[in-house]
Amino acid sequence: MTASTPSDLLDCIERETGPQPTHAVIWLHGLGADGNDFAPIVPELRLPAAPAIRFIFPHAPVQPVTINGGMHMRSWYDILVMDLVRQEDAAGIRRSEAAVRALIARENARGIPTSRIILAGFSQGCAMTLHTGLRLPEKLAGMVGLSGYLPLRDLAEAERHGANAHTPIFLAHGEHDPVVDIARATASRDALQALGHDVRWHSYPMQHSVCAEEIADLRGFLVEILSAGGPGPATRGA
């Protein structure tokens, strides 16, 4: 189903795993995709019937992207250079942060507190998940970052909020990713760990994509986060 949203909110696709959801996952797609991209993952995760979860897949705005010759496409921010970080669209990142915060506020208004919301994303969506999650003044249940990186990394320590200092973060990446080099991801992992964040790192022999083993690992993380006992101790990989 497509959510009916006020004009100031991003259009979204929603999938609910049961009636009256008590938890939510806000999942941000990658560059040039849209909310339909990851909607099929919901049944693939094979999550338990309880608690009921509302999966929200927003569509990023359509805007020109510099590295693609100024072509208009859905993106959370402009990408100015191929290495992703030598020049960054800070203003665009912060605009999308505000849009994600608005979606969180809508879930709060629908009865789901931030402490029961997981932010997730792939590629550019991963970047927005990490950027927004670190700065939120309310604790999230967890963060999921697939095949992406931490943008505005040099500002993370100064701008992060203590509310999510210990929120578990699932990070996963393809070892042969030609789009976001795994070195960019491991540098992001190391920066987060240096700040004391609870990072669960996974890598897989794949390119810029998602694989079955990754989905199985993600399912385990989500079940752990959604369980009454909450997350256990971190496992840190190289």
Image: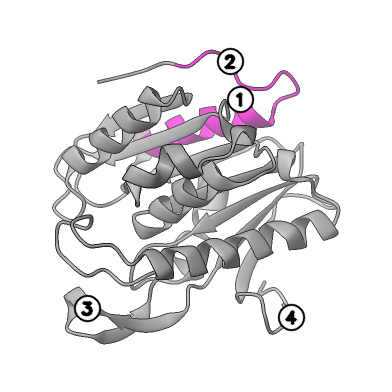
| Disc nearer the start of the sequence (1/3) | 3
- In the picture shown, does residue 5 fall above or below 118? below
* Coordinates of residue 59 in the picture (x, y in percent): 51, 73
Alpha-carbon distance for marks 3 and 2?
A: 42 Å
Residue under label 2, please give it. Answer: 232
Question: From the viewer's perspective, is 17 left or right of 234?
Answer: right
Name the amino acid type tagged 1. Glu
Q: Amino acid at mark 2?
A: Gly
Looking at the image, which residue is at 74% across and 80% down?
Answer: 6
Disc number at residue 6? 4
- Crowd band around label 4 with a 10 angstrom C-alpha radius: few (<14), some (14–19), many (20+): few
Where on the picture, by quarter, is residue 205?
A: top left
CA distance for labels 2 and 4:
38 Å
Residue 146 position, x and y percent, is 37, 45
What separation in Å lies between label 3 and label 4 (alpha carbons)? 30 Å
Q: Nearer the viewer, mark 3 or mark 2?
A: 3
Q: According to the image, label 3 marks what residue?
A: 66
Residue interval drawn in magenta: 214-234
Q: Quadrant of the N terminus?
A: bottom right
Q: Image height check: is 47 above or below 228?
A: below
Depth check: give the residue in front, 25 or 102: 102
Closer to the eye: label 1 or 2: 2
Asked whether disc 1 touches disc 3, contact meaning CB atoms under 8 Å apart, the reply is no
Identified at 60% across, 33% down, the residue is 162
Q: In the rendered structure, does residue 225 fall within the stretch colored magenta?
A: yes
Q: Identify whether 12 is placed above or below 116.
A: below
Query: Nearest the camera: 147 or 78?
Result: 78
